[in-house]
Image (cartoon, rainbow, N blue to C red):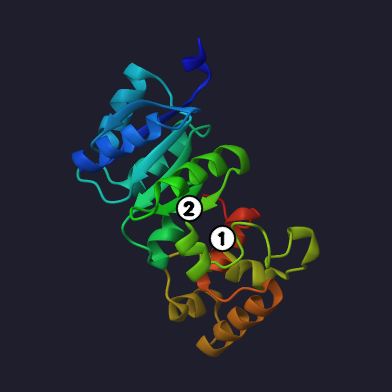
Amino acid sequence: MRINKKIQVAIADDHTLLRKALARLIYSFEDYAVLFEADNGKEVKKNILSAGIPDIVLLDVNMPGMDGFETVKWLFETYPQVKVLALSMFSDEKTIIKMLRLGAKGYILKNIEPEELKQALDSVMKKDFYLSEYISGKVISGLHNGEGIPDEQEIVLNEKEKEFLRLICSDLSYKDIAVKMGIRIRNVEDYRNSMFEKLKVKTRVSLAMFAIKHGFVQP
């Protein structure tokens, strides 16, 4: 049957109205079906055992009981084949970096158009990565389509630069990074500006995404 060939999506969001609306929308996409819905990470665990393993989990970041951070970490460790697409109202750098570092394959905002949700699902399945156009346009310019960020083979990083990239993916402030590296805050800023120039990017999130994408930091 064709239903068995469809991409199975699980939706985890504690807002019932939004969750139901997302389910109806996903059902309207020809190649997708909703495997189950959940209020939080704990229900995701239960539903996987009863309903099966989804191809994609559309995962709200802020949920009671077991939030998106805990859930994506558990999914990555337990079912690494599951592709998590983070869903949030927030576009701050720390949230984006943390979700992707923990294993999410993409990050979208709740105010996107239905067409972009379809695009995000397709991209996560085919390219293993997606960021909403708002985020990629405003914060991580060029990452989604690969333009503006060199391939790993095209750049050469020394050990200090690699260490800086690993630390940039944490929640540490630039001052804390300086302490970790045993250098002055001005030197950290020099590393940052040098990496901006070398990688042709402009934000901390861009650096973090490059580091994650090319394996300098493991989730």
Residue type at the position of mark 1? Met
Residue at (44% x, 81% y) in the render: 175
Residue at (77% x, 68% y) in the render: 156
Q: Secondary structure at mark 1?
A: helix
Residue 24, given in percent of the width and then of the height, sits at 32, 32
The image quadrant of residue 41 is top left
- Residue 193 drawn above or below residue 68: below
Q: Secondary structure at mark 2?
A: helix
Q: Which residue is mark 2?
A: 100
Towards the viewer: 51 or 144: 144
Q: Specify whether residue 102 is in view.
A: no
Give the residue at the far right of this rendering.
Answer: 154
Residue at (68% x, 68% y) in the render: 148
Q: CA distance from mark 2 to mark 1?
A: 8 Å
Residue at (40% x, 51% y) in the render: 113
Residue 162, given in percent of the width and then of the height, sits at 65, 66
- Residue 20 drawn above or below residue 67: above
Residue type at the position of mark 2? Leu
**Left or right placement of residue 106 versus residue 11 in this view:** right
Towards the viewer: 44 or 18: 18
Towards the viewer: 49 or 9: 9
- Pointer 2 and pointer 1: residues touching (CB < 8 Å)? yes
Residue 134, given in percent of the width and then of the height, sits at 45, 63
Q: Specify whether residue 59 is in view.
A: yes
Residue 64, given in percent of the width and then of the height, sits at 20, 45
Q: Which residue is mark 1?
A: 209
